[in-house]
Amino acid sequence: MSLGTLGIWLFEITILYASVGNPLCKSPDQESVGSGTKRSSVSSGSRPRNQKEFFYKFLDSDCLTEKLVDWFESLTEKCAPEQHAFDVPFELIELQKFDYALEGISFQQLIRIPNAVHASTSDAVEATAFLAIEDFLHASVKGLWEAFWSQDEPMPFSVACLYNSNMKFYQAEKAIANGRLGGLCATGIILNNPRHPHGKWDHVLELALLRPDIRSLHGGDRRPSSSVLGEALFCAFRMLLARSLSRLNFFQDPSTVYVVLVDSQYGGVVKVEGDVNKLNFDANNVYECAAEWVKNYSRITVSPIDRIWNKLGNANWGDIGALQVLFATFHCIMQYAGPPKHSIEDLAADHSLRLQTRRVERQLGDTSVNENGLFRYQQRSVSPEIVEVQEDAVNIESKESMKLEVGSVLWMEDSDWQKGYQIKEIISTDELTYYVASHVEEPGKNLFLYVGSHLLEPAWEDMTLWYQVQRQTKVLTVMKQKGLSSKYLPQLSASGRIIHPGQCRRPSSGGNCDHPWCGTPILVTSPVGETVAEMVSRGQFGTDEAIRCCHDCLSALSTAASAGIRHGDIRPENVICVKSGVRHPYFVLIGWGHAILEDRDRPAMNLHFSSTYALQEGKLCSASDAESLVYMLYYSCGGAYPDLDSVEGALQWRETSWSRRLIQQKLGDISTVLKAFADYVDSLCGTPYPMDYEIWLRRLRRNIHDGDHGKEVDATDDRSFGMPWWFKTGLSDPCCTGHNHIL
């Protein structure tokens, strides 16, 4: 179904008038979103006129699809039989966390979608379908806004259908009443703006295309057809163009858009990312230029087509099809309103409490059957008869329990080798349990041993283990492959899977047998030491330790940054002090499970230790890890530990503490070099300037007292470097930059 042409010209003339002589005023709802929303005052008058002309002429989705068909086919031919041409926008582990977060949220679609929507169906069925899609999106965005952002502030969005003759948005009910049903082509979530009741393209958060053939064309491949995908790319490209030409920047990330594809039962998500400034704006060849941009400068991800609605027309909110659409909508809201007040991790953390409450309701008692609190599925052959199962039929030996004790020997399968490790010490924190162990052939060398979760759909309490074992194994392996070597980084000693006692009845087709240990991953790292959190609790973290810790962690961050890796989860529990077998103690930065390897990775969110940029954007800037390190040193050296319960509160505490120089003053009581380092980090946060690790490693090294460094050098004297540190980094005076200007 192609988008029309007549109304688009009228619509774009309106945009041209607004962009030249009629400034767009903010909606009152925009003001209520909060500090997470940013605005830009860049005038569209400075943009070349041919960009607007290009936009005016980009009208027909079929023309773009025709230019991309061969490219779609070539991508498919290059793929292996079991592979897809495009990656998925969301990883399964992300959807699982999101699913746990949504457990306590109620969504209700009141208008049922008809069971089938085809071109030959009656107008009444098609009208009901558009009303149902509109109601589905309204329930989605309203539920997400109230759960994650605010229950008190009004939702700054509305849902309406796009009419292809004039490219305006109308409530489906009004459009149908006015005889415009045949021209409805999409449903969008748009920003409320009293001055533009029929919406504008640069106001669109998300578009949903209702098509009759989503499921029938994807077949066993579970992907949309080329024609449907081409139309989705057309809509996505128009949204990106409109945002680039807008006088006001409503979105924090205007280079990413989501388009939802749905029919009467199934749905999927298309995510398009790219900088349209790299487009060749040839107004005489718009579709060829757009196709070249799609091929060369965009990143397209397409989700599998999965069921959203059951045969009664009710949405299965907890199924993966609906979860994908909800997660896309969640990201669209975050583009406009900034990070939510209640993070996914915060809401998902309540899963454990809900699980325990459910066990109490069912009078299941304690977890003595399985010390991990997980239920074990006993696989049995199918019998056509109902038989009585005696209690002693399920005989689970105590040795098969996942509980490990001091003295236990754990065997691991590592490629073609088998390695045994004996447990020497059990370390339990609020988040996880791990072990100090040694190789049976080297009993004198201690190692950290982490045991992960092997379940396909782990409970939320196992998510920490997943990051600590599976994800950290991947990160440490990448470090090893890139040749990163530093004594301040953990070393990957071994990784593999547990060899459980008894005969393994693993199916030949893959997977695990019914033994609770089968397939459980293990990670072994070195060296071993006590955490900064333990040192602080024992009163063993003084001035020398603080300076040494800052130096060693910065050295680890510098080495990782050289390969484009950032830590993302610096806190006292993720820094250890190594004392055994060394002349001078040193610190090692561990816990790399949340490390950032590529743009789509997200850091851990911690109200006390995450950087300002991480809390605002959900990403890391070049100084984010250093800022987290400053917070860790501040708290570890006796800084006041505030009671934080929201992202807004955490951001306010950071703004107040930096503006009043509370952090610098506290670290200045410990060491002048730490105070200077905090000033440097404050000036750098939120800017595009890279960290100058080397200059601070030299300054910190001069203040480390190892007994053989001679006379201490005053760290505040920068004459040895020839110029002030802030001048060397290309920054202005540090008093004129930093957190006071980014919050």
Image (cartoon, grey):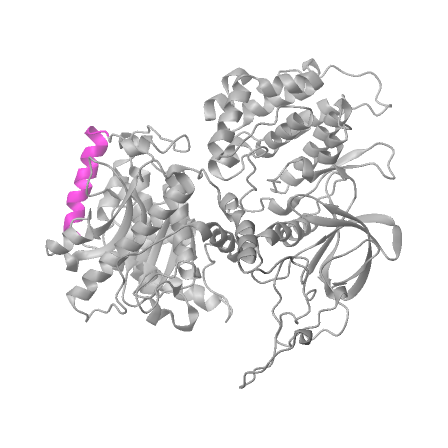
Look at 42% across and 73% down and name the residue there. Answer: 220
The answer to whether residue 289 is seen in the rendering is no
Rendered position, 321 above or below 46: below
The percent position of residue 619, horizontal first and vertical second, equals 51, 39
Question: Is residue 100 toward the left or the right of residue 549 in the image?
Answer: left
Quarter the N terminus occupies: bottom left
In the picture, residue 632 is in which quadrant?
Answer: top right
Q: Is residue 14 magenta?
A: yes
In this view, the residue in front, 389 or 657, is: 389
- Tell me residue 458's x, y (percent): 58, 58
Q: Position of residue 711 (x, y in %)?
A: 82, 16
Residue 722 belongs to magenta span: no
Residue 405: quarter of image = bottom right
Q: Residue at x 47, y 26 (%)?
A: 742
Residues rendered magenta in the picture: 5-23
Instruction: Tell me the residue at 35%/69% (across/down).
Output: 215
